[in-house]
Structure formats: structure tokens, C-alpha cells
């Protein structure tokens, strides 16, 4: 593998207590009930989260690989990355990795979504990563988990790296959406309003405990170029997934000149759904429970030289 181009920036790292206070105050503009507190991370390896490690602590890093310009307007099939190589490249050869990306089409034989969920330790991998495909027969969503030897993903990803250790996290519990912003946008814009141009990066997971949510899944690569947001949305397949849903990903409150995707979460369920989270669709009854930690630094890997803003939602 040729050497991956990497740019790095330090992130602004406030105290978890301050983050909890800011979110407690601000998220009430989007949710009727908001409780945010700093807690010891529950065991995220247990149901319903079923992550590859128990916690989110130790060497926390935000990673963005590639980007939508490798998918749009036409796919660049040379953009296939190995998470083991990425882990070594960012100085975390052993790491718990969660997040959102495009799945390994050479393995799946089709373009697909990926909800990364794996633990690399001393060269061995516990890989619980999910991929979601569109069934070309009937347009249904097909979900499966990757074998432990399949470490690749394609095109783009937004990942949270840590040692997977227990430790303090920010717990965000919200009920009943009253504003227009989804759970992650509400967290991001609330922090952005407070921290302004200081980039704060969060990674973690949330459970949609009650309700349904709009997701998309990429079908196989388009045979015609997709030049606009409308053409992209006509190509994507949209679904209404049903709780309980587990999502993993990252958000960043300000872009320190790295051409970032500022939020990106992918979802898996234990009833056969994997896709890209947009927003809950039963706001009156929706309930979210999230656990997040702060990245110390951000690593921008293989940033597209020619860029655009299509497909960042
Ligand atoms: Zn996505």
C-alpha cells in the first residue's frame, strides 16, 4: 500500500462537565426532555449496543478518510483503505474503532454502507462491523457483519479511535423532539454556538430507544455521473428504520481547514437494518440515549484534492 497522506490538528478539549452543562442548556431548543451528565461509561459491549469494546476512553482520536468527492460525480474504485493500515498510520496500531463509512465493495460485490465496530489488539481483530446493502431484486435493505479478516472500507469514513477502555463519558438522554434538528445536529450546533471557531470533536454511540428514523443506503455505483444533490438523492435508497437502533460516528464543531464532513453516524440494528442516519420520524415519541467522548486530535487522511460540497448531509 502506498503511504497515506495525513494531516493532523489538535482539537480543543473542554472538560466533560462543561460539555454536559452546555448541552443541558442548549438542546432544550430541540427536545422537550434533556438530561446530560458525566458518568462512568456503561459496558457498551453488552446489549443493546454490542460494541467491540466496553468503553470509549484511552487515546481518543477523530479520523476522517477520503470523502464524497471519491464517490461523486463518479466513483474512484482505487480508493479502498485498510483499517489496520490506517490504525498504524495514526499511531494507534491497537485500537477500538467505531464510525461511519462506505463498506468494502470488493468484498460485498457492490457498493454498501459500513458501521465500523472493531477492536484491533496486538495484531488480532475482533470485527463486529456491519455492512448494509440494497437488495437489487426488491430494493430491500440487507444487513450483515464482516468476517474478522475483512478490514477494508472504500471511499470515505468518519471514525472514532480509542483504546476502548472504561472511563468517564458524556451521557445525553433526550425525549420528544420539538425542534427541526436531529439528535446529532442538535448536539453539534449547540456546541458550535458556544465554542465558536474552536474545533471540538466528539465520537461515540447513541441508541434510538423509541420510534423510527430516516436512513439511506447506497445502492451499487451509479452508471451515470451524479452531479447535484437532487441526482444523488434520486440514486440513494431511503428507509424508515425501527427502534431499537444503534448508531456510531463522529461530529466536529468547526472545520480547522481540513475540508471535513462535520457529522456522520451510521446505524445498525439486531433486526436487519444498516444505513446512514438522517433524522427520527416520530418526533413525539422519540427517545435517544447517547454516550460520547472527546477526541484530542483529528487526523485527515487522503483528503480529496479536488473537492465539492455534494453529499455531506
Ligand atoms: Zn454515511
Image (spheres, grey):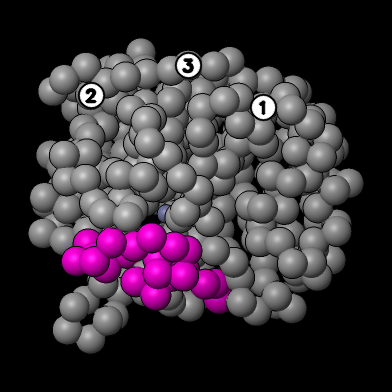
* Quarter of the figure that contains the N terminus: top left
Q: CA distance from mark 3 to mark 2?
A: 17 Å
Residue at image point 17% right, 46% down: 77
Q: Nearer the viewer, residue 292 or 8?
A: 8
Relative placement, left or right, of 196 versus 230 is right
Most extreme residue toward the right, as rendered?
25
In the displayed structure, would residue 222 be above or below residue 70? Answer: below
Which sits earlier in the primary sequence, circle 1 or circle 3?
3
Q: Are marks 1 and 3 in contact (CB under 8 Å)?
A: no
Vertical arrangement, residue 262 with respect to residue 186, above or below: above
| Residue of label 2 | 85
Query: Horizontal and vertical percent for residue 86?
Result: 29, 25
- Which of discs 1 and 2 lies nearer the camera? The answer is 1
| Local SS, label 3 | strand
Q: Which residues are magenta?
A: 212-235
> Magenta span has 309?
no
Disc 1 residue crowd, few under 14, some 14–19, many 20+, Cα 10 Å: many
Mark 1 lies on residue: 199
Amino acid at each position: 500500500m502506498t503511504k497515506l497522506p495525513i494531516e493532523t490538528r489538535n482539537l480543543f478539549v473542554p472538560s466533560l462537565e462543561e460539555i454536559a452543562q452546555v448541552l443541558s442548556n442548549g438542546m432544550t431548543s430541540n427536545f422537550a426532555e434533556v438530561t446530560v451528565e458525566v458518568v462512568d461509561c456503561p459496558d457498551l459491549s453488552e446489549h443493546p449496543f454490542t460494541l467491540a469494546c466496553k468503553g470509549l476512553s484511552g487515546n481518543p482520536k477523530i479520523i476522517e478518510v477520503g470523502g464524497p468527492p471519491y464517490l461523486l460525480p463518479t466513483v474512484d474504485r482505487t480508493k479502498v483503505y485498510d483499517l489496520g493500515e490506517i490504525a498504524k498510520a495514526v499511531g494507534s496500531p491497537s485500537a477500538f474503532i467505531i464510525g461511519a463509512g462506505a463498506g468494502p465493495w470488493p468484498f460485498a460485490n457492490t457498493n454498501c454502507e459500513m458501521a465500523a465496530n472493531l477492536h484491533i489488539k496486538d495484531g488480532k481483530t475482533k470485527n463486529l462491523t456491519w455492512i448494509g446493502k440494497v437488495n437489487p431484486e426488491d430494493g430491500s435493505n440487507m444487513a450483515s457483519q464482516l468476517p474478522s479478516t475483512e478490514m477494508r472500507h472504500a471511499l470515505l469514513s468518519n471514525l472514532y479511535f480509542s483504546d476502548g477502555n472504561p472511563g468517564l463519558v458524556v451521557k445525553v438522554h433526550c425525549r420528544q423532539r420539538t425542534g427541526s434538528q436531529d439528535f446529532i445536529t442538535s448536539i453539534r450546533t449547540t456546541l458550535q454556538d458556544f465554542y465558536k471557531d474552536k474545533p471540538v470533536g466528539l465520537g461515540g454511540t447513541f441508541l434510538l430507544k423509541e420510534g423510527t428514523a430516516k436512513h439511506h443506503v447506497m445502492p451499487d455505483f451509479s452508471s451515470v455521473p451524479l452531479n447535484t444533490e437532487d441526482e444523488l438523492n434520486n440514486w440513494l435508497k431511503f428507509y424508515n428504520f425501527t427502534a431499537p437502533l444503534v448508531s456510531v460516528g463522529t461530529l466536529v464543531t468547526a472545520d480547522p481547514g481540513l475540508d471535513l464532513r462535520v457529522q456522520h453516524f451510521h446505524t445498525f440494528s439486531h433486526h436487519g437494518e444498516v444505513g446512514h442516519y438522517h433524522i427520527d420520524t416520530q418526533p413525539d415519541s422519540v427517545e435517544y440515549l447517547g454516550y460520547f467522548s472527546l477526541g484530542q486530535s483529528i487526523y485527515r487522511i487522503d483528503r480529496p484534492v479536488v473537492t465539492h460540497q455534494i453529499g455531506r448531509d
